[in-house]
Amino acid sequence: MTVFIIRRLLQSIVVLAVTSLLVFLGVYAIGNPVDILISPDATELERQAAIARLGLDRPVWEQYWSFLINLAEGDLGRSFVFNEPALKLILQRLPATLELAFVAMLISIFVGIPLGIWAGFHPNSVSGRGIMAGSIVGFSLPNFWQGLMLIMIFAVILGWLPAGGRGDQGEFLGIRSSLFSLDGWSHLILPAINLALFKMSLVIRLTRANVREVLPQDYVKFARAKGLKSRRVVTVHVLKNILIPVVTVIGLELGNVIAFAVVTETIFAWPGIGKLIIDSIFVLDRPVIVAYLMIIVFMFIVINLLVDILYSLLDPRVRLADQRG
């Protein structure tokens, strides 16, 4: 286990270095932020002074080398727009995105897995076919259209829930979060459902496929032959053996939910990092864009490592220390 973790950490450093180079060059190539940040009425002297102040007058390799040096010190640069550390801006918005992703994944897991198990045990029933048809709809509908329909139905027509914003935050053990406030939950539930629908459909179909694969196995037939209750057969013999592929997808999709909550956050005016990156792209705020992508890559690396470690806990046959590469 220790050897595996050390190897993965070394690989992660290489991945981060390559990613930083690609991201830096990509952001450098998409345009000149000076054209957006500096007033067209500015004189040439003012324009050159602003370029020098932002460090954009240096060659790209020199800017990248300065970025690496600052990165080693934990500094991801200062925002061109807000004139604050990019990392600080992202960390200020990150709790809102984590709340949204956390609730969305809980909905996907606690709704998707039971529905997938039911559809796997009753594949030819009306309910089983209905669940699978619903999962296809969840795959097919565009995320932005789902969000608009949720707002139209539950906020405009019924008036049950607010259409956007984060709402009031409560405090528990010194931590402020929308999860500790009824008003916060009322603002959170619609964007969380919108973000969860696609993931829930994925979990349903994956769970159902694995249940259908496990049911014909001898150990399940033997458990039933012993007269075990259906609940025990499901929880002990079926659920445990389908969890590994499900955990894999859930782990990877958690990173996707955090990284690609941009559409949901924009539709519901949710003040997370997704909305921040959209606003930063419009004004070519390079430090914020690079910092965002670096943090997202780091999250994916950590999540993948945790999923691999969780493998060994779910299935003792998996020996991480013996893996190669």
Image (tube, rainbow, N blue to C red):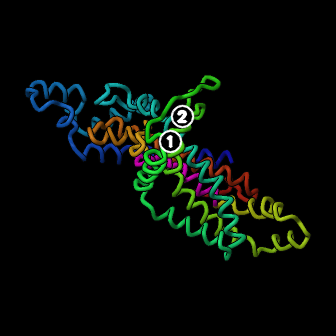
Residue 161 is marked as 1
In terms of image quadrants, where is residue 317? Answer: bottom right
| Comes first in the chain, label 2 or label 1 | 1
Give me the residue at 47% from left, 39% from top: 162
**Residue 198 in magenta stretch:** no
- The residue lying toward the viewer, choosing from 187 and 29, is 187
* Circles 2 and 1: CB atoms closer than 8 Å: no
- The answer to whether 11 appears left or right of 24 in the picture is right
Give me the residue at 66% from left, 52% from top: 110
Q: Does residue 256 show up?
A: no
Q: Does residue 92 show up?
A: yes
- Which residue type does callout 1 highlight? Leu
Residue 101 is marked as none
Q: Residue 28 at what x, y percent from top left?
A: 26, 43
- The answer to whether 277 appears left or right of 14 in the picture is left
- The residue lying toward the viewer, choosing from 51 and 170, is 170
Q: Is residue 304 above or below residue 176?
A: below
For the record, the magenta segment spans 246-264
Q: Quadrant of the C terminus?
A: bottom right
Q: Is residue 143 above or below residue 130?
A: above
In terms of image quadrants, where is residue 93? Answer: top left
**Residue 258 in magenta stretch:** yes
Q: Residue 34 at what x, y percent from top left?
A: 19, 34
Give me the residue at 43% from left, 46% from top: 156
Callout in the foreground (2, 1) = 1
